[in-house]
Image (cartoon, rainbow, N blue to C red):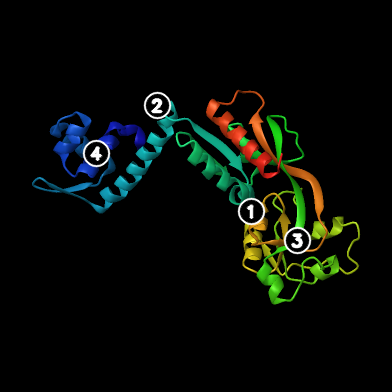
Amino acid sequence: MLEKIPLEAFRVFDAACRAMNFSRAGRELNITQAAVSRRIKGLEDHLGTLLFTRRGRNLALTADGERLFQRVRATLEYLEESLEPFRGGAPQIISIAASGSVSHLWLGRRLRDFGKQSPNISVRLLTTDAPGELSSESNDLVILYSTGEHPRWNLTLLMKEVLVPVASPEYLEQRGLDPRQLTVEDISRLDLIDYERFNAHWISFRQWFGRLPQPLKARLPQPRLSFSTYIMAVEAALRGEGIALGSLGLIDEHLRSGTLTTVGGDRIETGFGYYLGAPRFRTLSPEAAELHQRLLSATNSENGA
């Protein structure tokens, strides 16, 4: 059907809906009121339904007209947004991709700080756990869970992955537990909070217990709670529901503020980490290069480098 309808008819219909007046719609589009009326009539004929009810000069949308207007308006707004990068003098938009846990726990605050310092630069954040979307070259910058090598991205380490059990102070106080004195055997008997391993390289409690220098004597415990995302596991620990496996770099803000505390003395360094990636085969825009440098500088400052 679409190939039979002039696309201009939808712009005219949109203007008429917003103005609820054919004359005003015509002035907006620099055409006559009669031309607006003809295009609306042609659209109605193609669709086989009335879009407006007309009582003298007063217009009202029919039910079909209202449904069509909502879709046409959304489509035109999407097209307008898509054309922004091609408009001369439009602000540069930087796209950065990161996993849900990195975006929520680490990157979000740093992007807010960057926005305050550089208000004229727009940043679009893609949050995804799909490896193909994370490493897509349509992004300007990426944060990848990696060992530091990638064929299409130059990677710079933001933080190593170091995993240690964590809990809220309230959870520990309610049970009279001293987090420094808890052994691995003690931890295994507490309320463990785990998450699904979306990536084969991720480590949950089962793998963490298995990598310890002194493995558990007892059978590996089943978690009391298991969530589909790492973020949900951390949030459950913050609510005092049990012990979660904390990635120290990601939860550093919670550790510094005291809303989470490490439990026991065992920690595992996995050999993986979170790396900031810049494209190997194209030059970053000045705006993207600025964000790249700010993220690295913020990390170095927090680590005391």
Q: Quadrant of residue 86?
A: top left
Q: Amino acid at mark 1?
A: Glu
What is the secondary structure assignment of the residue under circle 4?
helix
Point out the residue furthest to the bottom here. 175
Q: CA distance from mark 3 to mark 4?
A: 59 Å
Kind of residue sitting beneath label 4: Ala
Q: Nearer the viewer, residue 43 or 133?
A: 133
Earlier-in-chain disc, 1 versus 3 = 3
Dots 2 and 3: beta carbons under 8 Å? no
Q: Residue at x 19, y 37 (%)?
A: 25
Q: Residues within 10 Å of mark 4 (few under 14, many from 20)?
A: many
> Which residue, given by chain and number where applicable, does mark 3 sit on?
165
**Closer to viewer: mark 1 or mark 4:** 1
Q: Secondary structure at mark 3?
A: strand
Q: Nearer the viewer, mark 2 or mark 1?
A: 1
Q: Are marks 1 and 4 in contact (CB under 8 Å)?
A: no
Q: Quadrant of residue 6?
A: top left
Which is nearer the N-term, disc 2 or disc 3?
2
In the displayed image of the protein, which residue is found farthest to the front? 304
Tell me the tag on residue 253: 1
Residue occupied by mark 4: 15
| Amino acid type, residue under disc 3 in the picture | Pro
Crowdedness near tag 1: few (<14), some (14–19) or many (≥20) residues, C-alpha within 10 Å: some
Residue 112 relative to residue 229: left or right:
left
Q: Circles 3 and 4: CB distance less than 8 Å?
A: no
Labels 2, 4: front one: 2
Q: CA distance from mark 1 to mark 4?
A: 49 Å
